[in-house]
């Protein structure tokens, strides 16, 4: 099983790229499955709704996300390719405020079965000016996004940190999210082929 994860801020084009990849896999008859975090199955989607509307403290959120994550992973049946819409990088980026947070999150990542560690993580890096422009066009999607909108620099810094932390054999690929969706899609496919997840 080859695992791919997609990461980035809201408005970075992450969801668009996931949909383009779905179409590409379908067109080329590539066996795959897609899931998202938090959520991913019927029961966990209920938890997702609670989390996205919650005012939980940060430690509770870290533990909620990882409890949901481990539950999801235990229910997944191996496929040729498994694609995550957000994974543990999001928890690090959004929930890491202190060294204590960092150590806890990295310790919990260590508990993930190695077969679920992505071979490729695509991080769609967006500058604040572009993000605010897209936000104005779309509006706030949920309370959770609104809560973190003012913490752009911290979250961006945490994503940059994660790009330098070696997680098993994972390759972390940063993509300029200001490019056209077609150019980004081609870059995604090029890397998936380069790292031999597909032919």
Image (cartoon, helix red, strand yellow):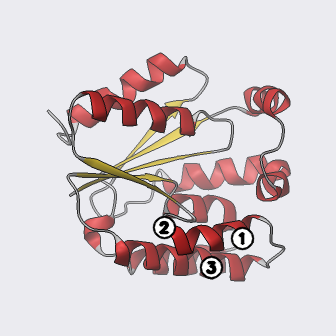
Task: Quadrant for the N terminus, please.
Answer: bottom left
**Is residue 87 positioned above or below 31 on the image?**
below
Q: Is residue 140 visible?
A: yes
Where residue 22 sits in the image (x, y, percent)?
38, 37
Q: Are marks 3 and 1 in contact (CB under 8 Å)?
A: yes
Q: Position of residue 81 (x, y in %)?
A: 26, 50
Do we see residue 191 in this rendering?
A: no
N-term-proximal mark, 3 vs 1: 1
User: Which label sits in the foreground, 3 or 1?
Assistant: 1
Is disc 3 surrounded by few (<14), some (14 to 19) or many (20+) residues within 10 Å? some
Sequence-wise, the earlier of marks 2 and 3 is 2
Tag 2 and tag 3, C-beta contact below 8 Å: no
Q: Residue drawn at (56%, 81%), measured in percent from left and top?
A: 104
Instruction: Point out which mark residue 64 bears.
Output: 3
Q: Which mark is residue 51?
A: 1
Q: State the residue position of label 2.
A: 41
Closest to the camera, between mark 1 and mark 2, is: 2
């Amino acid at each position: 099983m080859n695992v791919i994860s997609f990461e980035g801020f809201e408005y970075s084009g992450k969801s668009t790229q996931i949909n383009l990849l779905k179409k590409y896999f379908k067109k080329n008859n590539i066996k795959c499955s897609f899931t998202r975090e938090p959520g991913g199955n019927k029961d966990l989607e209920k938890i997702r709704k609670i989390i996205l509307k919650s005012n939980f403290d940060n430690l509770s959120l870290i533990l909620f996300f990882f409890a949901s994550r481990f539950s999801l992973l235990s229910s997944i049946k191996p496929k040729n390719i498994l694609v995550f819409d957000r994974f543990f990088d999001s928890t690090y980026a959004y929930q890491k405020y202190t060294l204590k947070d960092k150590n806890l999150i990295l310790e919990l990542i260590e508990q993930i079965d190695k077969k679920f560690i992505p071979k490729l993580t695509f991080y769609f890096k967006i500058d604040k000016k572009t993000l605010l422009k897209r936000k104005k066009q779309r509006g706030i999607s949920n309370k959770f996004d609104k809560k973190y909108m003012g913490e752009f620099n911290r979250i961006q810094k945490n994503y940059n940190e994660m790009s330098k932390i070696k997680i098993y054999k994972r390759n972390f690929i940063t993509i300029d999210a200001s490019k056209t969706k077609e150019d980004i899609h081609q870059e995604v496919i090029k890397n998936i082929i380069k790292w031999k997840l597909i032919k």
